[in-house]
Amino acid sequence: MIVSILALVVLVFPPFTATAQDLPTHGIAMYGRPALPQDFASLPYANPQAPQGGRIVFAEIGSFDSLNPFILRGSAPWGVNLLTVQSLLGRSYDEPFTLYGVLAESVETDSARESVTFTLRPEARFSDGSPVTVDDVLWSFRTLGTQGHPRYRTAWDKIATMEQVGPRSIRFTFTEPDRELPLILGLRPILQRSQFDVSAGGRDFAQSALTPVIGSGPYTVAEVDPGRSITFRRVADWWGNDLPFFRGQNNIDEIRYEYYSDASVAFEAFKSGLISVWREPNAARWADSYDFPAVTDGRVRRVEIPHQRPSGMSGFVFNTRRPQFADWRVREALILAFDFERINTTVTGGTEPRITSYFGNSVLGMRPGAAEGRVRALLEPFADTLLPGALEGYSLPVSDGRANRRNLRAAMRLLDQAGWRPDADGILRAADGTPFRFEILLMQGQTDYQTIAAAYVEALQTLGIDARVTVIDPAQYVQRTNGYDFDMTYLLRLMSLSPGNEQTLYWGANGVTDPGTRNWAGVHDPAVDAMIATMLESQDPEDFTAAVRALDRVLMAGRYVIPFWFSPVSRLAVAEGLHYPETLPIYGDWTGFLPEVWWFQE
């Protein structure tokens, strides 16, 4: 799929109009107006004629011990939030960031977006048949913001007031400028208050439990084998079946997630027909490991789904809270020691391009060379504290093809400047004699990353660094990463074409100490916070793009992650009978695609 640069810019940022949206409407976009009109028939990448029925089984690596994904405690299946709970608005993944009414029949805001009003649909129902009420909405926002997972608190802190302003209407007024906030609130899960009314015998919201949440989504939890599998069944008379937004969606009758301790075991289950779809992350295996009988006789077909979203970031992240990683020169040295070219060849066959920025593969990514124009103007107030490369330009090292010797020599010089020197036995030590030692923490099932880590440990030994790999079960891994109890681990941060408040969760200063955020690196940089604030306040798409590119520069120059590679396509091996529409969303195989718009047909 080839898209011209001009066409992609128009696609990502449609013509901007600053007209006030002071009347109730069917949708809201981050910039401009929604692409779909009031009377749209369905989302452009859904098939309204798709048959309903059938079953799909996914493989998950790890386990689960809770069915409440809205709190920090416990580990809950992804499908609970995806399938059983609804929000006020729903996202179209054929636009950078546009939402349309779901539980809410309309949304109303002003040009400055100082407040937003949602009006509920009268037909909206929870799975037990009770109506979704204003009281449920108010309770959900307050409870998620005060007792829920930390990812909900940033938006909650920006709500000055929330009040009922009509029989089915709720208005939120904000404490500060944030153009994205009406959209963020529109995507908050709405829960049934009565199920968590402890005084009436309900459950405690803040406690992890294996009791299903009563939601208003198209599926309910049908079967649970704790830690091993969970099955969801479609609600035949679901209240949202006839909404244009959902036409052609939620076609599969039964969706099941089977949990495995290891990816290789799960892949064998797929080969034997126990799993319906397999996402193959490794290009080398895609090329040489799909000659098993189900593929050769047609019971499994292979498809590649292109996308136009940013590369995001995948790699080993430094926990800069640890003293040995606090100095950027040390982080740069360890990036130099990572022989990407050799490891990429070993793991993927060398076919995948390296991630060169957090928003690469898109118009939002930083441009090579020195910062210019609006990007430079945003960064210059922080010139005295920016790390080398932010203004001048930063690029990742490339191996010399000879055991990475040149980069290892450069790494040794940087380590020496940072006060780390080898002793008589070649062990790298600080001035006080402390050896350079750290742990690479990985989760069971991450076999590719274990291979990468083993090669990296070997390279670090030549520098006198004692690195070791520790592999733990998913529950321990969640607990330790929530508490930032690691030196280095594998990080994956997916990026959208409309980054916003989630960037605070990823890199905001509060995450240095507050547990449960996604700021695993411990980023604490005023320039980062300022670029995110500018993104959220921008009313001009060009200013927004400049802020994202500036943020990209600061993060890359921060040397927080050793980047791996990305793929411009998703590789899916699919069992016979499963189908998807010919028209693909710009986000490709992402949330909103599989299983939402797929169907089963013999």
Image (tube, rainbow, N blue to C red):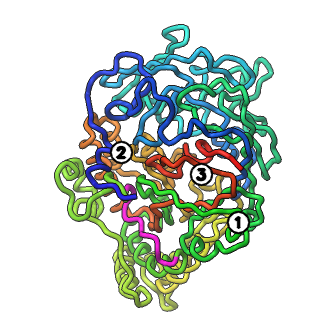
Give the CA distance from mark 1 to mark 2.
42 Å
- Residue 114 in the image: x percent, y percent? 36, 23
Crowd band around label 2 with a 10 angstrom C-alpha radius: few (<14), some (14–19), many (20+): some
Identity, as a three-letter code, of the amino acid under mark 1: Phe
Badge 3 amino acid? Gly
Mark 2 highlights which residue? Answer: 529
Residue 358 covered by magenta stretch: yes
Q: Which residue is mark 1?
A: 267
Q: In this image, 193 relative to 366: left or right?
A: right
**Residue 547 location (% of width, % of height):** 29, 46
Task: Looking at the image, tell me whether mark 3 or mark 2 is earlier in sequence order.
Answer: 3
Q: Which secondary structure lies at badge 3? A: loop
Q: Nearer the viewer, residue 320 or 258?
A: 258
Q: Tell me the residue at 69%/23% (across/down).
A: 126
Magenta region: which residues? 349-359
Q: Earlier in the sequence, mark 1 or mark 3?
A: 1
Q: Secondary structure at mark 1?
A: helix
At 35% from the left edge and 45% from the top edge, which residue is drawn?
529
Cβ atoms at labels 3 and 2 below 8 Å apart: no
Badge 3 is on which residue? 483
Residue 211 position by quadrant:
top right
Mark 3 and mark 1 in contact (Cβ < 8 Å)? no
Disc 1 vs disc 2: Cβ atoms closer than 8 Å?
Answer: no
- Name the residue nearer the viewer: 254 or 263: 254
Considering the image in quadrants, where does the N terminus appear? bottom left
Please state which amino acid type lies under the numbered disc 2: Asp
